[in-house]
Structures are given as structure tokens and as C-alpha cells.
Image (cartoon, rainbow, N blue to C red):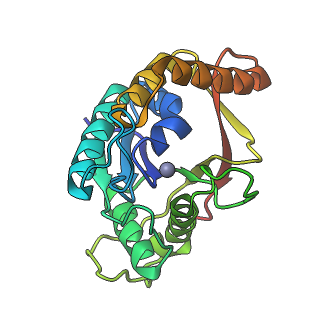
Amino acid sequence: MASEVVVVVFGAHPDDLDWGSGGTVARWAREGKEVYYVLATSGENGEDHLNGRVLPAPEMAELRQAEQRQAAAVLGVKDVIFLGQPDGKVQPSLAFRDQIVNVLRRLRPHIVVSLDPGHWAFDNFRLYHPDHRAMALAVYDAIYPAAGTATYRPQPDEGWPPHKVREVYFTGSSHPDTYVDITHTIDLKIQALSCHRSQITNPVALAQHVREVAARYGERIGCRYAEAFRRLDVPQ
Ligand SMILES: [Zn+2]
């Protein structure tokens, strides 16, 4: 069955995407949108907080990829793609932009969800992690004009035709202007986040935090729970 709308959600590390837009992703998947997750890294240099240990990078990558695939399945995501960038050392390089251009041309999304490259306040170490900033810039630069321009040839060029994304939903924005009602999918969001077992020390506090943040956004549009985005149309 051909889907009406393809959505690609970009993130730097496993769990970033579930935090930023898990409720919206679950809602869109339910509505019949075809959603893909694309992650710069596999979070291989993170710690296993559950067991208080540091695993060798290949083992950690395997663990966190498995957790991310499980979380994505909870939300109805069709596939999860790992780009193999080094955790903690992502750069908004031309090579990385080209890797993303190939992904965009292959998956051909109408909607991209990504971290906001604007309004950097540097008032939150987690939000403004160097990998997040690099990913935000690389995705922004890949969408326009690169992916949609025939004369832009990525290296290596996988041979996909150019593709123009229609709209972008930015997560982690300090100036959100678009809210998605996730009242009916917040439980799935919490369930997805709970799949990242190596990153969670207190599942009860996690659920409470997710509900508090979503309730604050929900108030702005008169619903119980919402996620916040800054939305941008891409020139066609
Ligand atoms: Zn992250």
C-alpha cells in the first residue's frame, strides 16, 4: 500500500527523536504516514546508566541500536537508519551533508523533523550538545538547496533523483509556533522512551517529566498533552 506522506525524523543519538517528537510520530504513524528514523550516531560512547558501567563502543552501539529499534517499533516507525557518525564528534561537514542528501533523495520525505538550528541560547548543555548542533546544521543545509537541486551532486552520488522536502518541523526550539496534540499517544511516547533502558535510572520520574512538559504545551492549544515545534516551509 503506497503511503500518502513520508516523514523522516533526524536525530544525533538514540532516544533524541523519541524525546523530541515521539508522540507526534506515533500519531502520524496511526494516521497512515510512513515514518523513518535516521540517526547520526549509535550513541556508542554513552554510558550504560542502568548497570553503571562503560561498555566497549561496539557493544554499546549494538545495545543502543536495539533499544532504538524497539522504541521505534512502539511508535509505528517503519525503519531506523544509523549513519555511523562518531558519537561525540559529529561535524557539519560537506561529507556528512552529502550523506544526508543521499538519504533524503532515497526516502523522499514530504516532512522532515529535526533539531532547530536557530535560536541557540546555549542555556542547556544537553540540548546544545555539540552533536545536536552539528546534526541540526547538516540536516538544514542538506534539505535546501542541496537535496532538491539537480546540479548538486553528493559525494559519493548514489544516483537518486533530486528531491524537494515540503516542510520541516524543528524540535528543541526556543521559539515554537506549532503544537501537535499528543493526548492519545503520550503513553506510547513514554513506552518508547522506556525502551532506552541503558539510559534510564528512574522510569517513574521520566514519565512524570514527559507528562509535565507535554501538559505545559497542551495548555497553549487547549488540549491535555502536546509537543512543540517551529515549522518552516521549504522553497519549491
Ligand atoms: Zn542527543
- Vertical relation: 148 (above or below) 232: below
**Which part of the image, by quadrant, shows the N terminus?**
top left
Q: Nearer the viewer, residue 76 or 74?
A: 74
Q: Quadrant of residue 144?
A: bottom right
Horizontal relation, residue 196 to residue 19: left or right: left
Using the image as rendered, state which of residue 110 and residue 224 is in the foreground: 224
Q: Residue at x 44, y 69 (%)?
A: 89
Height in image: 153 above or below 40?
Answer: below
Examine the image and state in which quarter residue 178 appears.
top right
Which quadrant is the C terminus positioned in?
bottom right
The residue shown at (38%, 46%) is 47
In this rendering, would 51 be left or right of 186? left
Residue 158 at x, y percent in the picture:
26, 74
Q: Residue furthest front?
A: 52
Q: Residue 106 in the image: x percent, y percent?
A: 31, 61
Residue at 46% x, 31% y is 28
Q: Which residue is located at x 27 percent, y 49 percent?
A: 55
Q: State the count of labels.
A: 0
Q: Nearer the viewer, residue 215 or 79?
A: 215
Q: Looking at the picture, how far across and down is residue 217, in whole percent?
A: 72, 27
Left or right: residue 104 compared with residue 55 = right
Q: Nearer the viewer, residue 110 or 130?
A: 130
196 over 151 or under it: above or below = above
Q: Measured from the top left, where is residue 141 in percent x and y?
A: 55, 71
- Whether residue 86 is visible to the viewer of this picture, yes or no, is yes
Report whether residue 2 is seen: no
Q: Quadrant of residue 205?
A: top right
